[in-house]
Image (cartoon, rainbow, N blue to C red):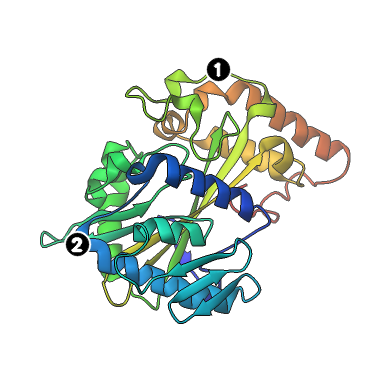
């Protein structure tokens, strides 16, 4: 699973792209509603608990951006006021939570069968998957329905044990990354229409110019909510042109090596066939250029290794 311990002040990360993310989320909440943001009745208390956590955490972590109020919080950048006390709430609690941060959000709750189910979510910038397809599913089915490589053989048992053990005071982080061949953060149109039935890498244009290649990395945190017991995921997406990230020393060589190392199942899952020729030619050329310019030393790549390059 690639988990590592998370420091509490690292739970929510904000950057200078905040307003773009906020605008994309607000637009999609308005346009798509329950397709992207939804809370099951039995998960309402847990979703409100997440709102309470944000209204406590964010003003302390980012006092110049958020201010705590008797009923919730004010976003000092967008001038939004969040009332989490009044009932009924002004909107679905997960939609409200989504407006507070750059992350997508999901909460899993244990049922009597011991499985954890996706019962609350705000999935607005996921790129490749839709909340409406996964809502109400147990954790195992979410992964198998998405054809996650090696889930049954390598991940399922460990993941189920982890979900049972995770504690509120021991949050963790994990990362993953993808290559995307369009610059649309909320939904990658290259894999098909978001409201279509037939979606997948088979719809993408093969070997588009490298200027269309985007590096998409997700930083996921997992933490148990202390009152409701739900396990909350925060999913923070970083989205940059490959031509930008490849300017960093050692990155072209590391990324090319990583893409080449994918097994057949991972390569299919990540759509490598549709972009590998163009991408690897570019990365190899950039690596060679960095060597020739003396920016990197061949054989020192491991010493310069920073995930996921």
Instruction: Looking at this view, name the residue that lies furthest to the bottom.
Output: 70
- Residue occupying image coordinates x 57% and y 48%: 23
Placement of 224 over or under 121, stated as above or below? below
Q: Are marks 1 and 2 in contact (CB under 8 Å)?
A: no
Q: For the N terminus, give its image quadrant.
A: bottom left
Look at the numbered disc 2 and give the secondary structure of its residue: helix
Q: Nearer the viewer, residue 68 or 203?
A: 68
Q: How many labels, in total? A: 2
Residue depth check, mark 1 versus mark 2: number of the one nearer the observer: 2
Q: Residue furthest right?
A: 293
Q: Which mark is residue 89?
A: none
- Find residue 100 and report its horizontal and vertical position in percent: 50, 62
Q: In percent of the image, x 63 and y 64: which residue is there?
A: 77
Outermost residue, left side: 112
Q: Does residue 225 appear left or right of residue 53 in this picture?
A: left
Asked if residue 218 shows in the view, the reply is yes
Who comes first in sequence, dot 1 or dot 2?
Answer: 2
Relative to 57, is 288 above or below? above
> Which of 135/36 is in front?
36
- The residue wearing badge 2 is 42
| Closer-to-camera residue (300/219) | 219
Residue at screen point 57% across, 76% down: 67
Q: Secondary structure at mark 1?
A: loop
- Residue 208, image quadrant: top right
Mark 2: few/some/many CA within 10 Å (<14, 14-19, 20+): few
Q: Is residue 287 above or below residue 41?
A: above
Residue 159 place in picture, x, y as percent: 30, 57
Nearer to me, 249 or 94: 94
Residue 5 position within the rendered picture, expressed as x and y whole percent measured from the top left: 47, 70
Residue annotated with mark 1:
206
Residue displayed at 82% across by 39% down:
291
Q: Can I make out residue 7 in this image?
A: no
């Amino acid at each position: 699973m690639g988990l590592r311990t998370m420091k509490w002040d690292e739970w929510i990360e904000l950057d200078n792209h905040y307003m773009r993310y906020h605008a994309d989320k607000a637009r999609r909440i308005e346009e798509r509603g329950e397709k992207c943001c939804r809370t099951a009745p039995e998960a309402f208390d847990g979703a409100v608990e997440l709102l309470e956590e944000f209204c406590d955490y964010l003003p302390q972590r980012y006092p110049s951006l958020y201010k705590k109020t008797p009923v919730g919080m004010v976003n000092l950048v967008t001038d939004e006021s969040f009332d989490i006390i009044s009932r009924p709430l002004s909107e679905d609690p997960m939609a409200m939570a989504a407006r507070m941060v750059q992350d997508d959000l999901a909460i899993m709750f244990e049922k009597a069968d011991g499985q954890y189910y996706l019962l609350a979510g705000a999935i607005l910038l996921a790129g490749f998957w839709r909340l409406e397809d996964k809502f109400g599913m147990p954790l195992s089915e979410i992964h198998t329905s998405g054809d996650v490589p090696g889930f049954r053989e390598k991940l399922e048992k460990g993941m189920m044990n982890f979900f049972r053990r995770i504690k509120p005071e021991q949050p963790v982080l994990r990362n993953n990354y993808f290559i995307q061949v369009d610059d649309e953060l909320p939904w990658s149109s290259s894999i098909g229409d978001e409201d279509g039935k037939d979606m997948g890498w088979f719809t993408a244009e093969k070997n588009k110019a490298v200027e269309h290649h985007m590096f998409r990395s997700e930083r996921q945190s997992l933490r148990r909510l202390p009152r409701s017991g739900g396990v909350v995921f925060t999913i923070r997406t970083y989205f940059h042109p490959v031509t930008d990230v490849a300017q960093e020393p050692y990155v072209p060589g590391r990324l090319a090596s990583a893409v080449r190392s994918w097994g057949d199942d991972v390569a299919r899952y990540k759509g490598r066939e549709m972009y590998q020729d163009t991408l690897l030619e570019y990365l190899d050329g950039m690596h060679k250029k960095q060597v020739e310019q003396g920016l990197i030393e061949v054989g020192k790549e491991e010493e310069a290794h920073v995930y996921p390059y």
